[in-house]
Image (tube, rainbow, N blue to C red):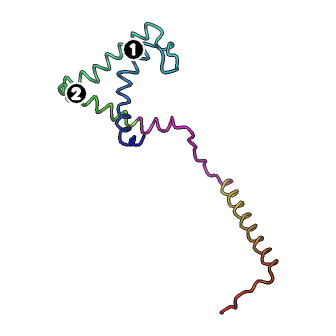
Amino acid sequence: HRYQHIYAPFLFALMTIAKVFQQDYEVAMSKRLYHIDATCRYGSKWNLIRFWGMKIITSGYMIAVPCYFHGIARGLALFVIGHMTCGELLATMFIVNHVIEGVSYAKKNTVEDAAAATAAADIKESEGEEKKSAETENNDTTVHPPSTM
């Protein structure tokens, strides 16, 4: 995926358009969302009537009304721009934060954590000093340069 930084934002922007024009219909007809059974939502005739009715109503105010007031080209452009903006925002903020595996969250530093970290650093420092003093005691033959002061 060498060029995904170029094409991925455009594909992410199409996400909500694909949901509105493809995924909703597939779920309503097959009564499945990928591997999830959706018969509880689309199993009854009343829910299917409600689904199709809401699709007609939302298509009316999202597509037909803007096309009526702004012309067909500008109305469709507004619809596409709105969906692409929404899709891009959802893809970059919501999906990235909820789908990535292995996400780790920072722990809140508490006074106890800070005290434990300080104590561990002090122990490590004192062990290092003890090791240095033991090495200098065992090496009495070390020649030190004369002091200039």
Query: Which quarter of the image is occupied by the C terminus?
Result: bottom right
Three-letter residue code for mark 1: Phe
Q: Secondary structure at mark 2?
A: helix
Crowding around mark 2 (Cα neighbors within 10 Å: few <14, some 14 to 19, many 20+) is some
As for residue 14 lying within the magenta part, the answer is no
Q: 50 or 21, which is in the foreground?
A: 21
Give the quadrant of residue 147: bottom right
Q: CA distance from mark 1 to mark 2?
A: 24 Å
What label sits on residue 36 in the rendered view?
Answer: none
Give the quadrant of residue 118: bottom right
Residue at image mark 2: 75
Q: Which residues are magenta?
A: 90-112
What label sits on residue 51 in the rendered view?
Answer: 1
> Residue 113: percent from the left, percent from the top?
67, 53
Q: Residue furthest top?
A: 45
- Figure check: 67 above or below 56: below
| Residue at the image position 35 percent from the left and 13 percent from the top | 53
| Residue at the image position 37 percent from the left and 36 percent from the top | 88
- Figure check: 10 above or below 27: below
- Figure check: 83 above or below 40: below
In the rendered structure, the answer to whether residue 76 lies left or right of residue 23 reads left
